[in-house]
Amino acid sequence: MNTNTKRYRKRTKYPGVYERESDIRTFKGRPDCCYDIAYRAGGKLIWEKVGLFSEGYSAKLAADVRAERIRSVRHGDELPRAKKKVIFFKDFAAEYLKWAESKKSGLTDKFRCNKHLLPRFGEKRLNEITTLDLERLKSELTKNGQAAQTVKHSLVLFRGMINRAIEWGLYVGPNPIKAVKMPNVRNQRERFLSVDEANILLAALKERSADAHDMALISLHCGLRFGEISNLTGRDVDLRGGTLSIYDSKSGSRVAFITDTLKECISRRMPEDLGEYLLTMRNGGKYKQVPECYREVANRLFNVGIKDRRFRVGFHSLRHSFASLLALKGVSLLVLRDLMGHKSLQMVNRYAHLAPTEMKAATVMLERVFSEKRNGVAAGEKL
C-alpha cells in the first residue's frame, strides 16, 4: 500500500503541516509517523516531506521548517532543491540480474533474489532498507527452516547488490548490511571415503557411466572440484610432465599432478582439437552439473538413512577424500593447501586431526631435543 498519497495525510494543529501514519514502519510498537509541509512558491503548491517521528521530527519541528521555507520565498532566497528519489529495490534488482546473467552465479542470484529478497524489499527504495530489516530477514529465514548457508548466501547477495548500486551511482551511503552478523555456518563435510570405499564407488560407476567414473577418478586423484573438471580442455593437459593446469577456478589458478592411473584415463580422452573439453555430453556440449547416475550410485551405496548432509557422500566428498587420505599419510597442511588451491591454511585446518603420524613425529623430535640437552648438562656436571 502506498503511504505517500494525499488521502492519507491528516491536518495537524499547525497550518500547512500534515502527518501520515505508515503501514510499514513501526516505532516503539506503534506505526511510525511522517510529517509533510505544504506551501506556495512561484504560484505553485509545493509538498515536501520533512521527516519521520522515529528520526526525531515532530509537527512543531515541521512547522518551523515550513516557516523557514515561506521566509525564503518571500525574500527571494533559493529553496533547497528536492533530492532525487532513490530507485526502488525491485527496479534495481531487475537491472542487477540482467547484468548478472553472464556471471557464473547468475542463475543462483536470480533464484535467491526472487525467493528471499524481492518479497521483503521489492517495494522499498534502496535508502529505506535498514539494518533492522536485514536482521528481520535473517530471523525469518531461520524460523522458516532455511539452512544457515542459505541465509548467509542471501545476505551476501544483498551486500553485493548494494555495493554494485553504489558503484553505479544509484545509491549513496553506507551499506546497511555492514552491522549485520553473518550466520555461523557449520556444513563442512565430515564424511570421506576410505580407499576400499572409493574403489567400490568407482566400480559401480564404471557399470553405469564412463563419464561419471572418470570425473570421480579425476577428483579422487587430483582433488578437483566438479566445475574445474568440466572446464578441462586438451590444452590444460601435459601428459609428458604429468600435470593439469587449472585456470580461473574458485580460488585462482594452480597445477594438479596426474597419477599413473589417471594418466591412462586422460590419454583416452584427449581430443583431436586441444581446445575441446575432455568430458562432453552426448550432444557434444559441456557438462553443467554432475551426472545424475553419480548421485543414484552414491545414495545407494552410502547414503541410505543418512539425513545430515555433512555425513552424506556427494561429489564434493571425493575432493574431501583426496585431502583426507593424504593427511592420513602425513602430508603437511601447507602442501594440502597448494594441492587443493586454497588461499589460506584456515581452509585446510579441518584435516589437521587426520595427520597424527606427522604430529606425533614432531612431538618425538621435540622430546629428543630436550633429552639431548638434559644429557649434555648431566655430562658436564660430572666433569
Image: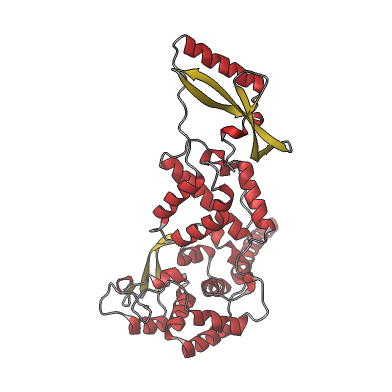
Is residue 216 in view from this perspective? Answer: yes
Residue 240, percent across and down? 31, 77
Residue at horizontal 56 percent and vertical 58 percent from the top: 115
Q: Is residue 52 above or below residue 71?
A: below
Residue at horizontal 55 percent and vertical 14 percent from the top: 68
Q: Is residue 62 above or below residue 317?
A: above
**Foreground pick, 160 / 28:** 28
Q: Is residue 246 above or below residue 34?
A: below
Image quarter in which the C terminus is found: bottom right
**Foreground pick, 225 / 146:** 146
Q: Residue furthest left?
A: 273
**Residue 165's image quarter?**
top left
Residue at horizontal 68 percent and vertical 20 percent from the top: 13
**Foreground pick, 298 / 70:** 70
Image quarter in which the N terminus is found: top right
Residue 78, percent across and down? 44, 16
Is residue 195 in view from this perspective? Answer: no
Q: Is residue 105 above or below residue 4?
A: below
Residue 116, percent across and down? 57, 55
Q: Is residue 74 left or right of residue 179?
A: left
**Foreground pick, 368 / 299:** 299
Residue 101, percent across and down? 40, 58
